[in-house]
Amino acid sequence: RELAEGRSWERAEIGRDEARARFEAEGEPYKVELVDTAEGDITLYTQGDFTDLCRGPHLQDSSPIKALKLTGLAGAYWRGDEKNTQLTRIYGTAFFTQADLDAYLERLEHARANDHRRLGPQLDLFHLQDASPGSPFWHPKGMTLWNVLEDLRRSENHRRGYLEVKTPLIYDKSVWETSGHWEKFRGEMFLVAGEGEEPHAGLKPMNCPGHMLLFGSGLRSYRDLPLRYAESSTLHRNEPTGTLHGLLRVRHVTQDDAHIFCTREQIEDEIFGCLDYAAYLYDLFGMDARFELSTRPDDKLGNDEEWDFTEGALRAALEKRSLAYDVGVGEGAFYGPKIDLHMKDVLGRAWQMGTIQLDAQMPKQFGLTYMGADNQEHTPYVVHRALLGSLERFTGILIEQYAGAFPVWLAPVQVRVLPVADAHRDAATELCGALDAAGLRADVDDRVETLGKRIRDAELQKIPYVVVWGDRETREAMAVRRRGGEGVETMSLDGLVDEIAGESPS
RNA sequence: GCCGACGUAGCUCAGCUGGUAGAGCACUUCACUCGUAAUGAAGGGGUCCCCGGUUCGAGUCCGGGCGUCGGCUCCA
């Protein structure tokens, strides 16, 4: 209605007192507060009988807007603070033409089709169910994908001087008190208590204390450093119900975690090592992550001098590597600043993936020391790092990144063999065995369905290669169809194996 | 956790103002033995999220819980 009238917005600059008096008279407490806290002159925009504060700029009138759609309704805390009352926010979007609006809605629909929450079950990778909210059930195909990531993590860690360890899942309450997590995160931990008892232990929500205890279990020399403990362990965080989100925010978290114990002098090289490692991994998946440096929070451990040093070390590393980064003021962990890698999901929402944290506090809390060359005890620094972040979240982003059509080295099924008719079943199964023996992931679809139907299904499952096997084929000349391709290509078995092997990053 | 919406078959969804549940795909069986994106027919399958209330009667109305979705807040 407003659009049809072609109403205009009128801009007015008025004095603070005048504005205040006006909104008080209108019974608009929120606008009064904005007037009180705004900087500079007060600018008002009036449209019909509605007047609001806005720094501007604004359209002069509504005539260019030809298409409008209200897209959502949501609660939002006044000034973004949970302690304040919640207001209703109405989301809408406007375009110059109806066609633009339609195109926008179509893009949105397309993005939704590539949402990992839809693709995951469709591709038989995982599912979620009420029996354990926030904890994915990984199906065989999803587990194949997971294990490709695990293998990558393990082999690269090995190559880069990490040592694989395994630490307990449950720790006595006193451990969490030492680390400071009991104080800060008890409410989000899964606690362990006997019948009618107060909790005396908790499931680990992160690996740090385990690795601290491991380091502290023996005498350490400066000659042992840097000591890089790696562990891909199951963590549990009792995330608030309203925050769970497919694979991107879960309660059952698996991090590709590591803790590097090092001397002050070794910090720079270790941070470089992490940044380079992260760059290697993200390049591998064609991902372009955004870096963010998060600095000291209000409830930090330690003093400002320590934080000046740790923040400075991270900042220097980013700058020496010429990496562009944003700064999240006060967003750091309570024990240290961090460099986070952020990625966007299919709907444009940002998620924290990898993290590299420099910690001068935990080792002190746990009383860790090593013997220096000067025959004195020193407290080590610790670099906490998870580069993929959580495997759950990484897989979710990966699904969306490729819209489910994984590059062949990641694809759960790389080759599907389709026998044309019953008579070709045995030969197809043998071919599948040969592919398997060559190290490929292959299967056979010998269901009693038409060939067209089975090709369609393979295509919907986004399988990279389909081999049709009938009377005309031999292992020297197979009919190979590429995902998304038109028509077929003649390839030998060896040619296909070589081509797929060539696609693997290692 | 907060605000709002939603919860029906394995999946996607329909079910009007309360009268005892339906489609497509998937699955099973039978026929067809098939050459590059859906062969045909028949059949099986549901505590309508859970608990309580109103009512002669609840998938439908009301309350509580759980879960999901969109935001917010949080995220070691």
Image: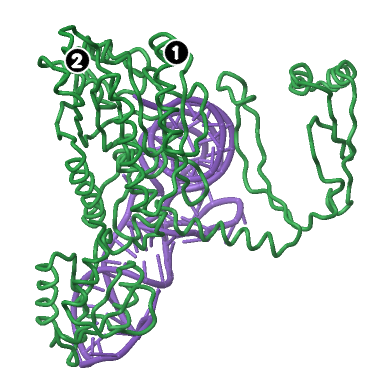
Chain colours: A green, B purple
A493 left or right of B52 in image: left
Neighbourhood count class around disc 2 (C-alpha, 10 Å): few under 14, some 14–19, many 20 upward: some
Residue A174 image point, x, y percent: 22, 10
**Given this view, does label 1 or label 2 mark the residue nearer the observer?**
1
Image quarter for residue A170? top left
Q: Residue at x 28, y 27 (%)?
A: A206
Question: Which of the chains bears the disc numbered 1?
Answer: A
Q: Which mark is residue A299?
A: 1
Residue B76 image point, x, y percent: 36, 25
The answer to whether residue A315 of the structure is visible from this angle is yes
**A467 is higher (above) or lower (below) than A36:** below
Residue A80 image point, x, y percent: 60, 26
Q: Quadrant of the C terminus of chain A?
A: bottom left
- Residue type highlighted by circle 1: Asp
Q: Secondary structure at mark 1?
A: loop
Image quarter for residue A334? top left
- Residue type highlighted by circle 2: Asp
First of labels 1, 2 by sequence position: 2
**B5 is higher (above) or lower (below) than A164:** below
Pointers 1 and 2 in contact (CB under 8 A)? no
What residue is disc 2 on?
A: A172
